[in-house]
Image (cartoon, rainbow, N blue to C red):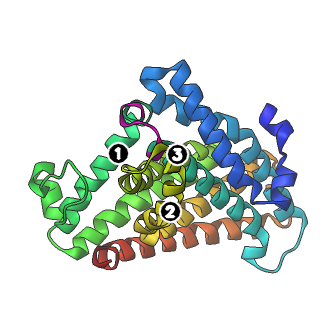
Amino acid sequence: MVLESIISAEEVERHPLDMFFLGFGTASLGLWLAYYIFPKEASNWFLFLTAFALEPLLLRLFYLEEEEEITLHHPTLWQRHEGVIMDYMYLFFGMVIAFSFWYALLPQELTNIMFENQISEVVRIQNLRVALTGGFIGTGAVTAAQFGPSLSAILENKTEMLKFIMINNLRLLFLFAAFSFIFGAGAILLLTWNAAVVGVAVGNLARQEIVAAQLSVRTVAYFKALPISFLAFFVHGIFEILGYFIGAIGGGILSVAIIKKHYNNPRFNVLLWDVLLLILISAGLIIFGAFVEVYITPNL
């Protein structure tokens, strides 16, 4: 693919920041291609186009990561996997910036088409948060009773609320790890979806700050509003996102090791132990993020 000739996995390992620009560029290109080719289904197709373009590079990263794990000796877990974790982090933030940028600056009627499914998901999450916290966030607020008696019972107190959030987030973590294990770099589709949803949410906050600005200064207004918008969503979200990354990396590394039949290698046990630790760390981050979301974020 053209993308692989522009930047290689080896270059990305040496310069992780390149993944930020790659994420921004690929997400923007996928978004506009989807709109021009499949205008009525753009909100679905841009996920596929973006993920399809990035998957070969990410799969190659997993191969390099697994090869280093098997052949090289690094004393700590972080030293063994720092590179690919940072690559995923930069890639995700590049996509979030791209999606939030276009959502905030484009006319509302256009974003309603390009981000139709993502807007629906943000509204659903906001409505759930209204039910969880009793506070009004954005439009389309509903009461807990509208979700049925089962959800109303779940949301009776903060302990049950915490269980509800943790179960849902841990389920998503399982999907990240499973997609990576079964499809190699398949978790990039889930990653792109989450980046798009976060991008719409952040872009919506930024849009409120720049809606009155003149067209010539809207880009400047966007970058002024961006830090506040990010802070509103990443107080607890950063822990969840890290958890998803790390879980996906663990699944991807194990997948490559089995594909390459390295289970007879003396260092395969080290690799298995690393995968287990990565999954446990990711679960811990998810659980901690749920605590922050329930007990800290509502007070900010």
User: Percent position (x, y) of residue 249?
Assistant: 66, 58
Q: In the image, which is nearer the foreground, mark 3 or mark 1?
A: 3
Farthest residue to the right: give it: 71
Determine which quarter of the picture holds residue 288: bottom left
Per the model, the C-alpha gap separating discs 3 and 1 is 31 Å
Residue visible at 41% across and 53% down in the picture: 210
Are dots 3 and 1 in contact, CB under 8 Å? Answer: no
Q: Residue at x 65, y 53 (%)?
A: 91
Asked whether 27 or 103 is in front, the reply is 103
Looking at the rendered structure, the kind of residue marked 3 is Ser
Q: Residues within 10 Å of mark 3 (few under 14, many from 20)?
A: few
Query: Residue 121 — which label?
Result: 1
Q: Residues within 10 Å of mark 1 (few under 14, many from 20)?
A: some
Q: Which residues are magenta?
A: 104-110
Helix, strand or loop at disc 1? helix
The picture quadrant where one finds residue 143 is bottom left
- 154 vs 3, left or right, is left
Residue 107 in magenta stretch: yes
Q: Is residue 283 left or right of residue 149?
A: right
Disc 2 to disc 3, C-alpha distance = 14 Å
Front tag of 2 and 1: 2
Q: Secondary structure at mark 3?
A: helix
Q: Position of residue 202 (x, y in %)?
A: 43, 55
Please tell me which residue lies in front, 137 or 142.
137
Q: Is residue 84 left or right of residue 126?
A: right
Q: Is residue 56 visible?
A: yes
**Residue with the mark numbered 3:** 216
